[in-house]
Image: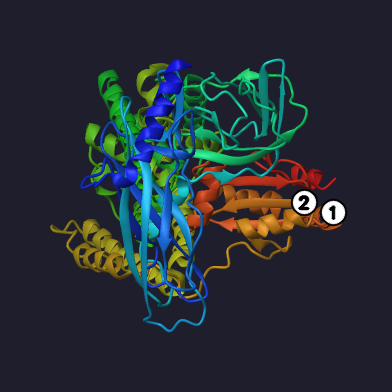
Amino acid sequence: MLIRLLRLLALAAALLAAPALAQTTHHIRPTLLAESARPAPGRTTMIALAMKPEPGWHGYWQNPGDSGVETAIDWRLPAGVGAGPLQYPVPHPLLISGLMNYVYEADYAHLIALTVPAGLAPGTKLPLRGTARWLACTAEICVPEQAEIALDLTVGDGAPTATAAFDGYRRALPRPLGGEGRFAASNGAFRLAVPLPAAMAVADPYFFPLTDGAIDYAAPQAVTRNGDTLIVETKPAPGAAVPQRIEGVLKIGRDSGLSLVALPGAVPPAGEPVAAAGEATGGGGGVTLLAALGGALLGGLLLNIMPCVFPILSLKALSLARSGESERTARIDAVAYAAGVILVCVALGGLLLALRAGGETAGWAFQLQDPRVILFLLLLVAAIALNLAGLFELPMVAAGGALAAKAGPAGAFWTGALAAFVATPCTGPFMGAALGAALVLPPAAAMLVFAGLGLGLALPFLLLGFVPALRRRLPRPGPWMDRFRRILSLPMFATALGLAWILGRLAGVDGMTLGLAAALLVAVALWWVGRRQAKGRTGSWWPLAPAAAIAIALLAVLPRQPAVAASAAAGGPLAAEPFSEQRLAALRQAGRPVFVYFTADWCLTCKVNEKAAIERAEVARAFAARNVAVLVGDWTRGDAAIGRFLAGQGRSGVPLYLFYAPGKPPVTLPQVLTPGTLAALAT
């Protein structure tokens, strides 16, 4: 207690002396930024106070905890321009000498809504000026700092100019909880119940109270799960009256949290402990990691039966049967194949984490949101299908183009890499929660989950390579292999057709036409190659050179935006509307049950569920009878708002199915739906 008192006295003295200090350097450097340099009149635009602490220094949250001061700005704005309150990102707990501090120890930013009055002419200058004050501290000292901040804007069309940075700032803000919490304080215990789906991954949970005097800040917090409720137990603030309402932020992952309001009420008994790992304790979120790793392994294993992967795996297995490899060679091939799969999964996972760290809202299969990647895959898959159909031959045909066609470990490695790359749109059961959890785990643990996904995908071929008994069960080589090879060309042609459709959704009719023209050109060139091969001519591959050059040129000029925006899956038998958080809130406010689903054109599981379960007449009748509203979020093009909402649900990709019953927390539905599952929601 004495330490706390002395610290607070020292802090107060420092703050009183602040105006007299002439600061030339700052331990936390502020910068004022704008999302749009040309805000539109009559609209609200976002600006940000970006803060960059020196190593070892930290700034404070809105409720700083046992000590500290929140940041403030004294604005000097043009007439009519208004600045909203500072919005605070999710903080981190920092315990120093028995005092709990809610802080930021790395770069952070406060978002501010800026209102521009209507009627201003384009080109009008908007000089924003202000004095920002904050407290910069280390574990030993605190320094009150202030700085003059300035930003010059010009009235214009409101087009954003710093979208990526501001998406990153928004992602760090807590998102509103869909329901209301309950709390009880008695007999020296404070218990908080937060409605949260049991399937939602949570890592390093911690409750930051915004209401002062609600809890003892420095007391340890125990977090458990009881079904769809997360329960936080700690001590109430000593000597304080029990408040009638508590506001705060529940941290559910690294830089991720939910803002909530809790009222007095019954709190269910404690349930299964939630691992309290992370920065404060130095732990690793063991339970979450093991669950995510198991889901990734199982999900990767199931990917092998997807139509875009099965032909590749089958051909590689047949190559073993065809060649009658030795034990040693079979094992080397299996290891090389697994290495290719795992490295691609880890590389894609690493790139995904890097993009998200840079403020992007990318999720798994993010590369398939680029039409140039789809065109590349279309040409590659079409060439593989034509090869399987016998139009032309590659030396030591295996699958997957020239690299995968190489003999020995190199061919096995590139076959594995190709299988992993084309498997990414096939997000199946068990993978959604696993990959979502990976995004809230520490980077090393997240990379382990991505490697587990690759290991699951490579397991069948590893078994073939290391278990001779399985290999002996493969059919003996014979003429049937050529017939089987041609049969396998059918799912590859179907995959090429699906890629052409996705290209049309991403790049419009013009883009799809360009893609089909390129595929036709490559097909004609490969047919010519096959003719020259049949006649035994040398240099039989030269007809492919001009076709490949044209295809590369198309990759560069392919439009990245459709001529007409895709309408997603809106409409249809369920009269679905496009998803937005505002529309969801309005429907819930009106007391209507709401079914929300998120999909993407490149998500096979999504499309199967839509045709087999969602867009069914019996579901439409059941929903209409109970007045169930349907919202659909199309993530084909990686919409940032949808990406933020998915991240808030602990998911990194689609599909995701939610049902909001009036007055109840949302329920996360399984990733494999049936018409009965949906119709039962309306009973």
Residue at image position (35%, 47%) is: 355
Q: Which residue is located at x 27 percent, y 66 percent?
A: 556
Q: Earlier in the sequence, mark 1 or mark 2?
A: 2
Q: Which residue is mark 2?
A: 593
Residue sitting at 46 percent across and 53 percent down? Answer: 495
Q: Amino acid at mark 2?
A: Pro
Q: Is residue 477 visible?
A: no
Between circles 1 and 2, the one closer to the viewer is 2
**Relative to 427, 177 lies left or right:** right
Q: CA distance from mark 1 to mark 2?
A: 8 Å
Image spot of residue 107 (x, y percent) = 33, 42
| Crowd band around label 2 with a 10 angstrom C-alpha radius: few (<14), some (14–19), many (20+) | many
**Label 1: which residue?**
626
Do the residues under discs 1 and 2 have CB atoms within 8 angstroms? Answer: yes
**Is residue 144 shown left or right of residue 363?**
left
- 10 Å neighbourhood of mark 1: few (<14), some, or many (≥20)? few
